[in-house]
Amino acid sequence: MENRLSFSNPVITLLTDFGTQDYFVAAMKGMILSINPTANIVDISHDIPPQDIQAAAFTLLCCYKSFPAGTIHVAVVDPGVGSDRKPILIQCAQQFFVGPDNGIFNWICAREKDWGAIHLTNDQFFRHPVSNSFHGRDIFAPVAAALSMGSAPAAFGEPLKDIVQLESLAPSAISENTIQGRIIHIDHFGNCVTTFTRADLAPGKVAHSWKLLVNDREINSFRDFFSEAGNNEIFCIFGSAGFLEISARDASAAEILNLKRGQSLLFVSAALTEINARCN
């Protein structure tokens, strides 16, 4: 890992499932500011569903590239707090990621490929006593603050070769005419984000030669803009995060189609109508 002294007072982001009703977020910010009074703290979200590691991983995956080099991301969705799961620091994409080793950073590392991890074992950087239920305040916040003050990543512990992995985002090819993926997120508007990207589909062929099969529905309408669709029309569109989304004009596609996160999808050649049975 590189020494992070080259970054001057970087942004520290917070992503948690703590909500804003309790004191947890304030306690983390207070700990950071106690170490670095000029810290620039940005809230990504504190409304991740409780213990939902995949939701946190997806949210961070969609926004980390919007932050400048040297940013320190603290992500605390941690159902294993107090267990033997490791607290870790990852350096990747010229940024830093601090949190539990439970898969929360895996999709970013898989995308970037070049990453390094440290097992946070040097308790000189921790708040004491360390609570068994609040590592966000007692380990991750003070480590992030120390990083922002110029401490080198190697000072926090020993390198890790492997980290916990989530289910891969890469769709699987069933045949040359069939690709299987799944829904990985349903947003506030009811748009269903899939695992398919432009790279997964032959350029220029999607709107003419492919269709998406979900439940008993065939979706063969592809739009570049929401305004192109008719009211309540179900269509596919590449969203701002780079993934194909199932959407509806002025309505919730998730509600109309009764879709859930994790649901399997098939992209098939438009000629292969008999594959429809495989989505049932």
Image (tube, rainbow, N blue to C red):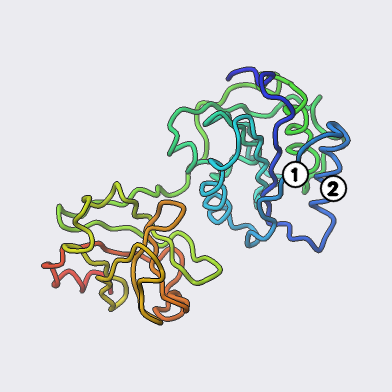
Q: Position of residue 259 (x, y in %)?
A: 42, 73
The amino acid marked with disc number 1 is: Gly
Residue 178, placed above or below residue 164: below
Q: Position of residue 28 (x, y in %)?
A: 80, 45
**Contact? badges 2 and 1 (CB < 8 Å):** yes
In front here: 80 or 213?
Answer: 213
From the viewer's perspective, is 153 left or right of 218? right
Q: Earlier in the sequence, mark 2 or mark 1?
A: 2
Image height check: is 67 above or below 193?
A: above
Mark number, residue 27: 2
- The N terminus - image quarter: top right
The numbered disc on residue 124 is none
Left or right of residue 15: residue 102? left
The residue depicted at 74 percent of the width and 24 percent of the height is 122
Q: Is residue 166 left or right of residue 22?
A: left
Report the mark closest to the observer, 2 or 1.
2
Task: Please name whichever residue, 220 or 154, is drawn nearer the observer in this view of the structure.
Answer: 220
Quarter of the rendering containing residue 124: top right
Q: Secondary structure at mark 2?
A: helix
As helix, strand or loop, the secondary structure at mark 1 comes to helix
Residue occupied by mark 1: 136
Q: Could you tell me how far apart the alpha carbons at marks 2 and 1 are, in whole angstroms?
A: 9 Å
